[in-house]
Amino acid sequence: MEIEIRLFANLKDRAGKDRVRVSLEEPADVETLLAAMAQTYPSLAPALPSALVAVNKAFAGSTTIIHPGDEVAVFPPVSGGESTPFPNPTYFALTTEDVDIGEIQDRLKQPGVGAIVTFAGSVRGETMREGLPSETLYLEYEAYQSMAETKMAQIAREIWQQWPQVKGIAIVQRIGKLEIGETTTIVACATAHRDQGAFEAARYGIDRLKEIVPVWKKEVDRDRSVWVEGDYRPTEADN
């Protein structure tokens, strides 16, 4: 069987394109797929040992079976809407447009809400992290959009499981080129009172976004650019 594989971030750069194809004998699993990729596309081989694989928008393990017609994506660890109904107002978005924090908070307001805790990340001009440019001119964000929206919905369900008094959740991720000072990410959680988990839920939301939502950023300075990879490696248990 022939499988088309979507590539993101540094793997896309290595291949010089965003999709590659490999031929596999059935039955085939993820381990076989990665071996075939390394043999067919030697430029990808150095990045594959640390790469993650998604099959049909779910994180896959080495023994996950691949079938003809499956949607397969390979990407580095994450850097830094779904049809399932939610019990309270929710808002998920990946957007190239500037975001208005007040407008996002308005989406969560209702008569029973008395507190909205909001995390907003922005582009720094100085990174000061080993292996990255010391001065950042701008960031470029890329996302595996359909899977990212599914994972945002999953985060909302996880929040409601841990903090059932949360009355609304918003998760927004910017993509594309972002200049110094521009907002990159917003996570907002609404509750009736401030002591009903709003702070904890918002912190959990941004931390979880950095773990499982397939979004990557490239830091760019005057001399070079670097794709940023995270340390967390999702498994099938994160589905």
Image (cartoon, helix red, strand yellow):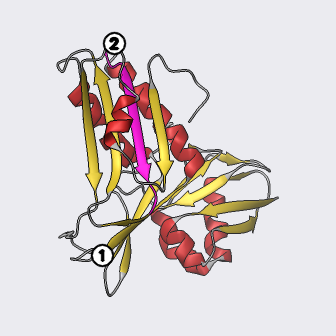
- What type is the residue that disc 2 sits on? Pro
Q: Is residue 205 something that shows in the picture?
A: no
- What type is the residue that disc 1 sits on? Leu
Q: Is residue 64 left or right of residue 132?
A: right
Residue 233 percent location from the top left of the image: 40, 51
Towards the viewer: 112 or 123 = 112
The answer to which quarter of the image holds residue 84 is top right
Residue 121 percent location from the top left of the image: 28, 51
Assess whether residue 72 is covered by the magenta stretch: no
Residue 111 percent location from the top left of the image: 34, 12
Towards the viewer: 230 or 182 = 182
Residue 76 percent location from the top left of the image: 46, 61
Task: Point out the residue furthest to the bottom here.
Answer: 223
Please tell me whether residue 23 is drawn above or below residue 233 in the rendered image: below
Q: Which mark is residue 42?
A: none
| Quadrant showing the N terminus | bottom right
- Magenta-drawn segment: 165-176
At x 73%, y 67%, the residue is: 21
Please tell me whether residue 82 is drawn above or below residue 36 in the rendered image: above
Please tell me whether residue 92 is drawn above or below residue 19 in the rendered image: above
State the residue position of label 2: 111
Q: Nearer the viewer, mark 2 or mark 1?
A: 2
The answer to which quarter of the image holds residue 82 is top right
Task: Point out the residue furthest to the top here.
Answer: 112
Q: Earlier in the sequence, mark 2 or mark 1?
A: 2
Q: Is residue 67 left or right of residue 208?
A: right
C-alpha gap between disc 2 and disc 1? 43 Å
What is the magenta segment's predominant secondary structure?
strand
Q: Is residue 213 left or right of residue 195?
A: right
Instruction: Please state the total of marks drawn on the protein image.
Output: 2
Assess whether residue 166 is covered by the magenta stretch: yes
State the residue position of label 1: 137
